[in-house]
Amino acid sequence: MNTAHFKFWPARLPRELAYPRVPLFEFLETSARRYPENTALIYYGRRISYRELLDSVERLAAALHRMGVKKGDRVALYLQNTPHFIIGYFGIMRANGVVVPVNPMLTAGELKVLLEDSGTSVLITTADLCPKAVKAKEETGLREIIAGDYPDYLPPDPEIPVPAALLSREETDPSVRRWLDILNDNPPAPPAVEVETGDLAMLPYTSGSTGIPKGCMHTHATIISNTVSSAVWNCLLANSTVLATLPLFHVTGLIHSFLAPVYAGSTIVLLSRWDREAAVTAIEKYRCTVWTNITTMVVDLLNHPDIAGRDLSSLMIIGGGGAPVPEAVAQKLHEVTGLKYLEGYGMTETISQTHFNPPDRPKLRCIGIPDFGVDARIIDLETGAELPPGSEGELIVSGPEVMTGYWNRPRDNEEAFIFMDGKRFLRTGDICKTDDEGYFYIVDRSKRMINAAGFKVWPTEVESVLYRHPAISEVCVVGTPDPVRVENVKAFVVLRDGYRGKVTEKDIIAWARENMAAYRYPRIVEFVTSLPKSGTGKIQWKELQRLEKERVAREGYYRMKD
C-alpha cells in the first residue's frame, strides 16, 4: 500500500472514521429530532421541513407494511428526482425493506429484467412512467404499484423554472395506488425496526453497458460509510445548502446530493431534470454552497450566455466524477467562480466514492487520493503483482464502502474480488496509475484504448485537447476500424452556437494536427447536433463506438491520405 498521499491529507481530518452502527434511516430521524423546522428539501420553491419529511416517511413505511412488505423484501423506485424518491427511499428502509433504485429512462422490457432479477414486490413511480410500470407488472411477480405525480409537491407559484412536462397531472391506471392517498390514509405508525447495520439495504444495478445488469448488494453499513465520509470531506453542516442535479437513482447523486445532506441536517435544492437556467437561478436564490455534478453539466452551465453576470458567489465546493474535466473547462470555471473543480472516483459497487481530491490541494484530470480507510493499489493485469508509482495497471480497492457482492451471481463474485495481504479487494476494471505523491489517475477503461498503427491512444487525452478549441461545445472520441492502421481516431463534435456553418471538419482536423502528436490527432471529424448520454448524463462512448463499427460494416472504411 502506497502511503505517499497522507502527506497531502486535508488538515484537521482523521485518516479513518468511526461509523454509526445503526440502520441508515436513523440519519433522517436524528436530523428531524435535532432540526425539526429546518428546511430539508426545496422543490422549485416548495419547502419541506425535516419534521414533515419524517412524517411522510413513517406514513409510507406503515402503508408498505400493510401491503405485506417485510424484512428483506425488495421495493423499487422508478422515479426522476422528486420528493417521492426521497420519501420512498427512507420509507422502504423504515419498513425493513430493500431499496432497488431504477433508471427512469429504462423501457418496459428493461424494467422487467431488473424487476425479475431482484424479485421486486412493490414499485413506486410517477404517472408519466406508470404505463411502462403497469406493462412490466403484467409479466413479473410485481404485486403493487404506487404512483405519484410531480404536482403533488410543486408550489402554486414556482420560484425557479419548472420543465413544462412536470406541470400537468396525468391519469394513471385504475389498478395503481395513488401516492397522496397512501400517505393520507396511513398514520405515521411504522412497524417495529427489525434491520441492523449489516443487513441488506439497497440493490443498485450496474449500467449493463458491458452485459446484463448486475445488482450490487449494499448494506446499511456500506452506504453509511460513504454518506458520512462525503459529509465530513465536504464539511457539510446544518446550514449548508446542496444543489441536487445528479439523478438520485445513481450512486453519486444518492450519496452526495441526498444522503450526506440529510446526515448533516442540510437543505437539498432538488431539480427533477437538468436545466442550466434553473440551476443558476437556484444557486443565486437559495445561496447553494455545494454542487456535485458531472462534466457535461459544468460545460453546459459555463456555456450560459450570461454566466459572467450571474451571482455564483455562495458556492464553496464544486466537484464530481464520471469523466475527467478538460483543462479549458476547469480554467473557465475558476475564472467564473474562483473555485477549483474537485474530481473524484467511485463505482456502483462502492456506492460512490473511493477517491477524492483534497479540497486544498486538488489536481486536474486526477481522481485524487483514497477515501477514509480505503486501501487502493495498482496491479499488473497479467500477474496480479502490485506495481510502483508511474506504472499503468488495474485499480483495486478495499474499504468499508465496497459491496458485499453481486446479487445471485456467485461466478461474477469470484471474478470481481481478489485477496492480497489478508484483505479482500474489488477489481475495478479501470486502468490507472499513481504519481510520486500518491495521487491516482484514470488512464481509461482498458477496452476503450485505440490502437492506431501500433500506437496506444487514450480517447480522454484527445478529448481534453479538443475541448480547448473555441468552437467545440462537446466531443467524444472513438476508434474507427481501418484495414492498415487497425484503427483511426475519430471525433464526434457538437459545435457551439455561432460556429455552425463557419467551421468545417477539416478546420478541426488541421487545428488538432497542430496541437497534438501525429499518431494521436483525429483523422476523422463528424459534426453532430448532440451526443448520446446515459440517464446520469454521461456521454455514451460505447454507443458511438458500436454505431461506428456498424457504419464501417455497411459503408466501408474511410479512405485515408496519410
Image (cartoon, rainbow, N blue to C red):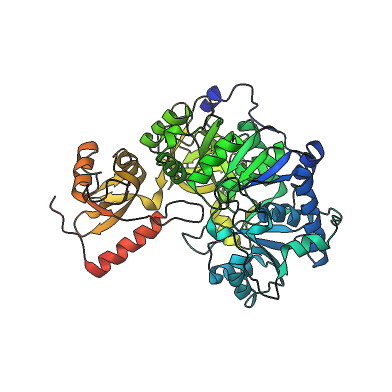
Q: Quadrant of residue 304?
A: top left
Residue at figure coordinates x 60%, y 75% from the top left: 135
Percent coordinates x, y for residue 330 in the rendering: 41, 34
Identify the image quadrant of residue 143. bottom right
Closer to the camera in the image, 190 or 152? 152
Residue situated furthest front in the rendering: 157
Residue in view at x 68 percent, y 58 percent: 152
Query: In this rendering, does residue 400 appear at all?
Result: no
Residue 445 location (% of width, % of height): 42, 49
Q: Is residue 271 left or right of residue 462?
A: right
Is residue 296 shown to the viewer in this render? yes
Give the total number of marks visible in the rendering: 0
Which residue occupies the extreme bottom position in the image? Answer: 138
- Front residue of this view, candidates 179 and 330: 179
Left-right relation of 26 to 517? right
Q: Is residue 531 left or right of residue 417?
A: left
36 or 119: nearer the eye? 36
In this view, the residue in front, 173 or 423, is: 173
Image quadrant holding the N terminus, namely: top right
Against 262, is 316 above or below? above
x, y percent for residue 380: 44, 43
Position in image of residue 492 (x %, y %): 31, 53
